[in-house]
Image (tube, rainbow, N blue to C red):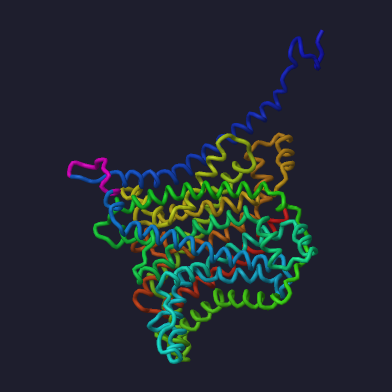
Amino acid sequence: MSTPWSTTGAPAPPRVGALSRVKERLTAAHVVLWACFAIVGTAVMVPTGTLVWQSFTKSTPAGTVLALDSFAKVLGKGATYQLLLNTVTFSAAMTVVAGTLGFLFAWIAARSNAPGRHFMPIAILLPYLVPPTLGAITWILLLSPSNGIINTCLKALVGGAPFNIYSFAGMVFVESLYTFPLSFMFFFAALSSLNPTLEEASAVSGAGPLRTLWRTTVPSMWPTILSVATLLFIIGLESFDVAWFLGYPAKIYLLSIEVFLLTRYKYPPDLGSAAVFGVIAFLAAVVMIAAYRRVTLQRERFATITGKGYRSGALDIRWMRWPASVLFYLLVTIIGVLPVLLLLAISLNAVSWPFEITWRPSLENFRWILTDSESLRAIGNTAFLAIGGAFTVVILGFFVGYIGVRTQVRGRGVLDYLAFVPFAFPSTVLAVGIIGALITTPLYNTIWIMLLAFSIKFLPYGLRNLSNNMLQIHRELEEASFAAGAGLMRTLWRVVLPLTVPGIVAAWSLLLIVFMRQFSLPIMLSSPGSQVVTIMLFQEFEAGQMGHVAAYGMLLVGSCIPFIVVARYVGRASQSI
């Protein structure tokens, strides 16, 4: 005789309803996984495969044949190694400067008793009003050795131009200024949730603030420091805006600049050599992504940083309170306020270029950009790419993020890694791969190829924002939906999506800002009729029309302000879920 609890005899009848629901969930999850694999894999691997193919082939009268000519040409030049050394040195120097500034000021804002520290996380958003392209142009206006405003004012005192922005130091200086706010935000988030017990014990034992910082805080933050340093180094490797405006005139070439010159300035374009640099960049990308993921996972295992929201007391930094606060706000003013004021003055014709105070304000420059047909087309293209690209990335990022952090489907880690690859690809290199893959299709030389490139390049941005947001949702809500008989897609629509709306809006707003500011992809992929605002700005700069440049700059700044506000406050709301 058997009972329902017996281990012998006839088995108990299966619970068909429960098994069906499990099967439905697994089937739906796998369908979503493979759909995401198909989309992301095609978007990432086709340009990458095209780069590899172009680097190992050459065109002959008989057709395309396998050859190592491009590798021999590139690797046989001494200039190649100087270029790679420049790129690595620039990235490392920028990482040290931006990372150090970001960490120190984040520590002051999160852990010290400096006056105005509570407003620092808001003030640090001001530099995001100025795209790197505008930032580089602004510092040319200020520190050009021939007619920069600061150099012009100092020539009478020192007998010459004391500063030269067209230098390696100038490149590192400007790139660091516009990258350090990013490191600040990463470090501030980690420091705000750091267990203060060790710091408080250090202070009680008589250690000063700097000793406590060096001996206690830094070791506790080491995984985060490595993670942020890796991120900054990747950003440095793909730098284009600053490298083009400040490095190219001084013949200081980085990898991204060389790829651009080979494909856009050389006739006929040397796609083979550009592809070789692309393969080098791809190998570096794989290594950097692996390193970034490794240190990120290590950071998550550290018990000193948790989600408990520690309420730490402010550490007394004594005489450094006021100097630290003044230095922070001075730096933010120099980065975020001074460029905007200068651009505003030039756009209104209150200041002319070369530098002269005219005091004849007018709206002529704005009238021109808002009535010229080519300018209006560029504004429309920018709006289309920003809105359409942000929607594309958010939708794809939502599904990829859900598979990665809310399911246990085998292969989700590979999908997440694949989706993150474009982040470490220099934009110019990615553009070469996309051009090679689509040059024979109707998409080539249209705005759609830029929409595709934007979506591929910035998928990691949306994915990380949405994944972090989903991690804050309790699993019990999904489990209750599944237990009630809802399938995966219904659960996503009725449970997960409503709870992630604040995070989606914040991610969409940030992506919109990034797309409006983008310069390196459009300059590689745009064609007559598909230019965007940053390309028009570049063309006017090359033509010496600084009034038009400043007007375009103010248009970009004004367009970014509402979305920065939305991303800030809606993003904070998403963290309370």
Q: Is residue 277 magenta?
A: no
Q: Please say if 198 is above or below 343.
A: above
Locate residue 293 relative to residue 287 in the image: left or right.
right
Q: Please say if 519 is above or below 303.
A: below
Q: Is residue 69 magenta?
A: yes
Comparing 325 with 136, the one in front is: 325
How many numbered marks, from 0 up?
A: 0
Name of the residue lying farthest toward the left: 61
Residue 78, percent from left and from top: 30, 57
To which quarter of the image does residue 540 belong?
A: bottom left
Comparing 468 with 539, the one in front is: 468
Residue 288, percent from left and from top: 50, 50
**Residue at 72%, 38% in the rendered image:** 479
To which quarter of the image does residue 209 belong?
A: bottom right
Q: Please say if 498 is above or below 6.
A: below
**Residue at 35%, 49% in the rendered image:** 438
Locate residue 406 relative to residue 366 in the image: left or right.
right
Residue 8, percent from left and from top: 76, 11
**Residue at 43%, 47% in the rendered image:** 283
Q: Quadrant of the N terminus?
A: top right
Name of the residue lying farthest toward the top: 1
Provide the residue span drawn in magenta.
Answer: 61-71
Is residue 311 among what the camera can see? no
Locate residue 409 relative to residue 119 in the image: left or right.
left
